Image (tube, grey):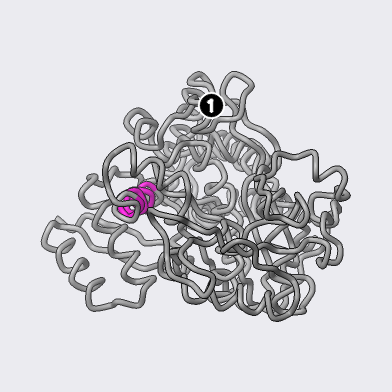
Amino acid sequence: MSLRIYNTLTRVFEEFTPLVQGEVRVYICGLTVYDLMHIGHARTYIAFDALLRYLKYQGYNVRYIQNITDVDDKIIRRAGEKGVEPLALSSEFAEKSLQDQVSLGLTTADYYPKVSETIPDIISGIQKLLEKGYAYEAAGSVYFDVSKAEGYGMLSHQDTEQLSQHRIEPSPNKSNPLDFALWKKVDDGFGFESPWGYGRPGWHIECTIMSQKHLGDQIDIHGGALDLIFPHHENEVAQSEALTGKKPFVKYWMHTGFLNSSGEKMSKSLGNILSVRKLLDEFQAEVFRIFVLQTHYRSPIDYSRENLVNSAKAFERLRNFRQRLVDGGATSHDLDALFHELKAKFDEAMNDDFQTPKALAHIFDTVKKANQILDEKPQDTQEALKIFDEVMGALGFAPNEKKVPDEVVELVAERNKYRAEKNFVKADEIRDKLKERGYMVKDNKDGTTSVEEIR
């Protein structure tokens, strides 16, 4: 069975065929960095982390971009409350976000573009939309004209009348209520100079320009949480296809379900969040990963401490079993067939729109059967261990689960940032610092960074 993906755009399962054979370009919407990463965010990133790892497990060369939204009204409001500069606030939480991603064991992106570093490109993109007649200037702001966008509403599967029922940013300067800001005039406060005056970019144009700059005019997979379908991703499609004239902007759109707390979506606005840092004070990252992957990425998850405790017990079973394989035994081939069957079932589950619950169920079933075999007589466990590590690695579980100190995690995150920026001198300096502290870093083919204690 070849890989099939449920495409939000078409609402059908489609066989995965990348735009360029053997290569996959992936863009995942990053955080608006005005607060700590919470476990609702982490649910989305772990789900897509499993996707990235599985694509690499299948032999694809993956280029992965995750943006950092460091220019936004929420950031400016929070900075005003704290009495700090907006970019100082966003820089602080961008760093903490990257540290949290390392702590969660997430795949390092090839680059983490920031809005603040992309302003000239954004201005250039807006100018092109004006020249092509897809945008108009009004009172110092620039708006995208949705009436010019063929097929507007296709991603969210709604017509313009239905879309107009959504909460939309009002403005008396718009020609149409559905039109959205590409550039917003700012009378005072934080902003940038532009041909239309002082202001700052709209949210949607930021992702369009960053994805085009780092992945090209068309990309294979664009992902994010369910609430980004409209207006954010719908508007990305309209802008991007207007800019390039190429369709589709994204071949496969993928969206994750919400992580709920007491039946409500976990979000900062509802005040029911739990930060990743608080979670990891009590539970290992692998425990939360099992909790997330036991639910399909498109389905909602209801968070509870009881579920995490059960996930902790499940992870302990896996860890104990792996140690049993490491310990090995006398020569026999009874386990080989069982684990080759696991690999086939694992691939079948993951090829079915990344059915991680089924994949994990096959792993636990195999562990149970393998333990029964090992109870009867010693086995040669080398092949079983190899396959076990392969399938577990494709889900993001590293063989070495020893906790790494927070200061080492922070240094690794900083080094990953410099590597993404191609600043290898700084990256090597941090590598040397880590070595002085007794840790060796290894950059893996799957885009992750392994840390091993050397003393």
Residue 202 left/right relative to 408: right
79 w.r.t. 239: above or below: above
121 w.r.t. 446: above or below: below
Can you give x and y, in whole percent of width and height, for residue 329 in the image? 42, 48
Residue 278 left/right relative to 208: left
Q: Amino acid at mark 1?
A: Leu
Mark 1 surroundings: few (<14), some (14-19) or many (≥20) residues within 10 A: few
Examine the residues drawn in magenta and state their main secondary structure: helix
Q: Which quadrant is home to the C terminus?
A: bottom left
Range drawn in magenta: 90-100
90 w.r.t. 368: above or below: below
Residue 423 left/right relative to 302: left
93 w.r.t. 111: above or below: above
Say which residue appears at 38% left-offset and 53% top-offset. 189
Res. 297 in view: no
Q: Nearer the viewer, residue 400 or 305?
A: 305
Can you give x and y, in whole percent of width and height, for residue 181 in the image? 63, 58
Q: Quadrant of residue 298?
A: top right
Q: Quadrant of residue 203?
A: bottom right
Q: Nearer the viewer, residue 97 or 134?
A: 134
User: Is residue 94 within the magenta segment?
Assistant: yes
Say which residue appears at 81% left-offset and 63% top-offset. 15
